[in-house]
Image: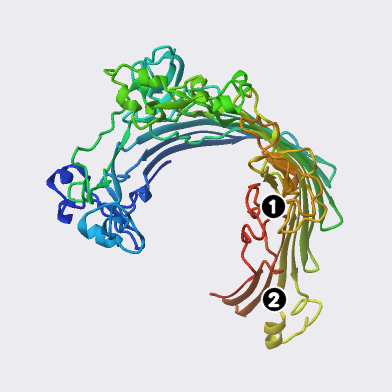
């Protein structure tokens, strides 16, 4: 079976002729056929927002499934293929972005005053406070997903059923038609930027250039996933169930366009002698810069931060397993107990590569932040890379000492994206009691105890191992109750069994249903800007305005935000201090969830072919607020430790919905 889907983005202002706005012929040749973006301080802007133009997506999928039943076997085999394309049709600000502040129509543009001037008046004069124009290539991405599977359900006996299966998954590397993607970072390659006295290495690699493959990561062909399950009946009332499966997640991890494939030219708008340098008529008289692509090679984005997809990235792998015992007792009761667990590996992690080594940290903050003469200014005047340094820290007269101690001092931050080293673990005990419909009542009680751990980040860039911590989505205990009661009124019921037609329509057909959930809260983030002292962060009687111990010891030895908290749980973070604590607090959690939803329904049969259904639904019937956001964990905020003054309830207040349905 083939399936084809396509979505295209907005085309607001597409094809607009900018010559009709009074721009110069030079700008008309520079701008794309889109309406420019204008903003005026104090007024609504004009022009569409090209940042909001959505991509045009193309998905082509093929699926073939064969099934065969013989003897005790029920076999299925199949093949799945999916081709995912993403053609981004977003012009950015390729027709220009211009802001008007009113500064040029003040009484004295050289000495601006808020008492005079108007942004629209500046616009009419053509005097922009700022502006720029973009040039970028539109990515045309493609990725392939293939799967092959076989499964056999075997009825071994009237007591035992087995499920056996095997699946192979393949995720092809993401590629771009124009090779506008990076493909890793060469740590040992000599940099083409030559600085006397420095031995510089490192630089970005681009997909599809020289001997580099077009895909952003290496293909992997060994993603096999076995599946095993069983169900065994003990006697007539007890069943054992269990299973194991290895599942691979498939997703398009897109690091974004490579540097060099977009370029911004800024408008010169400063004022001298009361006259702006450039006006809206011809905002870029010196021309517009065009993207250079990958021609910069290893010197691309020097003086800036860079990021790239790890060439060894692989699709995540999850092992799921469960064991359940289920027993029926009485006529309508069912109880079950189950262990459910999972182990996920190869989860994507971002890792910083350009960091200070541990030996350098021993020099102290004063030495590391000291300004020293910038050695990058010694690059030869005729070097083709000297112009790339302008406007970055490489072109400044001085530079901080810590920058020169980095492994790759010619760059800012260097982020290795989607490194497949993360993991998570989930273990749970799940209990359920079910009463099937009898005497008009049907209800269930489900209880879950669980714990989720994860390792998805490094506490410090210098760490060699990920930090195992509690998951921010960990919910240790959850209780859910559901019930439906069909009231015993009307024909065939305990009360009013001999009711007439009119009485039956008034008394019969009523039901009440309810769903209640009691759930513990999730861990909160560790406060920012501070380190734990070791004193407990939890307090005996938390309130929405004071959820945990906020007492903090400052660098000068004094304390703040203590109130009734006797001992400081936090101390001010020192410069370049290494982190040794979890980013999430297990001892302090967000408020839990206590919710109750009710429904009252009345079903009435008018005639054999006609019926009427009335419902009254009470969502959040107890009008209980829930707080998913907060508390404020900024240690230097005025609402540190507060929830109610920091955020608003995450759920709606009580909602009552009335509905009437006529069926024929």
Q: Quadrant of the N terminus?
A: top left
* Image quadrant in which you'd find residue 358: top right
Left-right relation of 361 to 169: right
Vertical arrangement, residue 297 with respect to residue 145, above or below: above
Please state the horizontal and vertical placement of residue 464, each as a whole percent of the image: 63, 22
Please state the horizontal and vertical placement of residue 28, each as a whole percent of the image: 16, 46
Residues 631 and 448: in front is 631
Query: How has the structure been colored for display?
Result: rainbow
Please state the horizontal and vertical placement of residue 350, each as a whole percent of the image: 55, 31
Q: Which mark is residue 472?
A: none
Q: Given this view, does label 2 or label 1 mark the residue nearer the observer?
A: 1
Q: Is residue 597 visible?
A: no
Q: Going by the picture, which residue comes out furthest to the right?
A: 330
Left-right relation of 556 to 117: right
Cα distance between the residues tagged 2 and 1:
51 Å
Residues 116 and 329: in front is 116
Callout 1 secondary element: loop
Vertical arrangement, residue 117 with respect to residue 469, above or below: below
Left-right relation of 311 to 482: left
Callout 2 secondary element: loop
Q: Which mark is residue 641?
A: 1
* Image quadrant in which you'd find residue 72: top right
Q: Residues within 10 Å of mark 1 (few under 14, many from 20)?
A: many
Q: Is residue 212 visible?
A: yes
| Mark 2 / mark 1, whichever is N-terminal | 2
Q: Which residue is mark 2?
A: 509
Left-right relation of 609 to 333: left
């Amino acid at each position: 079976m083939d399936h084809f889907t396509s979505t295209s983005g907005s085309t607001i202002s597409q094809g607009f002729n900018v010559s009709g706005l009074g721009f110069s012929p030079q700008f008309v040749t520079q701008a794309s056929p889109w309406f420019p973006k204008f903003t005026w301080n104090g007024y609504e802007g004009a022009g569409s927002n090209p940042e909001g133009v959505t991509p045009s997506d193309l998905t082509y999928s093929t699926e073939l499934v064969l099934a065969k039943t013989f003897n005790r076997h029920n076999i299925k085999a199949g093949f799945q293929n999916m081709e995912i394309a993403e053609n981004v049709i977003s012009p950015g600000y390729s027709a220009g972005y211009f802001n008007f502040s009113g500064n040029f129509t003040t009484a004295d543009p050289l000495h601006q005053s808020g008492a005079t001037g108007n942004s629209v008046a500046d616009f009419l004069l053509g005097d922009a406070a700022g502006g720029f124009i973009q040039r970028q290539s539109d990515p045309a991405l493609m990725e392939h997903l293939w799967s092959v599977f076989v499964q056999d359900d075997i009825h071994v006996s009237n007591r035992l059923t087995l499920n056996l299966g095997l699946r192979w998954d393949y995720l092809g590397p993401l590629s771009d038609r124009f090779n506008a993607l990076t493909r890793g970072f060469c740590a040992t390659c000599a940099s083409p930027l030559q600085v006397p006295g420095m031995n510089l290495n490192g630089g970005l690699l681009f997909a599809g250039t020289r001997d580099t493959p077009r895909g952003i990561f290496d293909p992997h062909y060994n993603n096999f996933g076995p599946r095993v399950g069983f169900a065994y009946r003990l006697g007539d009332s007890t069943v054992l169930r269990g299973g194991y499966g290895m599942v691979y997640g498939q997703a398009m991890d897109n690091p974004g366009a490579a540097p060099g494939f977009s370029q911004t030219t800024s408008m010169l708008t400063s004022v001298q002698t009361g006259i702006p340098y450039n006006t809206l008529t011809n905002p870029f008289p010196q021309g517009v810069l065009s993207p250079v692509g990958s021609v910069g090679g290893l010197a691309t984005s020097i003086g800036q931060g860079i990021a790239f997809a790890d060439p060894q990235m692989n699709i995540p792998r999850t092992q799921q397993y469960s064991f359940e015992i289920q027993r029926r007792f009485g006529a309508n009761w069912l109880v079950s107990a189950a262990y459910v667990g999972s182990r996920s590996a190869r989860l994507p992690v971002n890792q910083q590569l350009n960091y200070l080594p541990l030996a350098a940290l021993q020099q102290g903050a004063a030495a590391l932040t000291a300004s020293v003469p910038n050695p990058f200014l010694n690059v030869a005047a005729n070097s083709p890379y000297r112009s790339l340094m302008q406007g970055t820290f490489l072109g400044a007269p001085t530079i901080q000492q810590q920058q020169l101690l980095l492994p790759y001092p010619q760059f800012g931050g260097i982020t290795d994206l989607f490194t497949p080293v993360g993991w998570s673990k989930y273990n749970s005990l799940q209990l359920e009691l079910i009463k099937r419909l009898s005497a008009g009542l049907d209800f269930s009680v489900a209880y879950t105890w669980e714990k989720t751990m994860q390792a998805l980040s490094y506490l410090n860039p210098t760490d060699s191992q990920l930090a195992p911590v509690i998951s921010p989505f960990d919910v240790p205990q959850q209780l859910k109750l559901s019930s439906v009661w069909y009231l015993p009124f009307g024909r065939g019921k305990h009360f009013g069994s001999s009711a007439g037609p009119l009485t039956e329509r008034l008394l019969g057909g009523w039901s009440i249903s309810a769903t209640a959930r009691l759930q513990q809260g999730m861990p909160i983030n560790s406060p920012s800007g501070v380190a734990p002292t070791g004193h407990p962060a939890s307090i005996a009687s938390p309130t929405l305005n004071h959820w945990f111990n906020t007492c903090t010891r400052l660098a000068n030895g004094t304390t703040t935000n203590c109130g009734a908290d006797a001992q400081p749980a936090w101390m001010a973070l020192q410069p370049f201090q290494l982190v040794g604590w979890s980013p999430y607090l297990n001892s302090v959690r967000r408020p839990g969830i206590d919710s109750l939803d009710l429904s009252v329904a009345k079903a009435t049969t008018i005639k054999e072919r006609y019926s009427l259904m009335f419902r009254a639904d009470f969502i959040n019937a107890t009008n209980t607020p829930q707080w998913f956001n907060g508390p404020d964990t900024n240690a230097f905020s005025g609402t540190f430790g507060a929830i109610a003054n920091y955020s608003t309830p995450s759920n709606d207040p009580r909602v009552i919905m009335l509905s009437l349905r006529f069926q024929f």
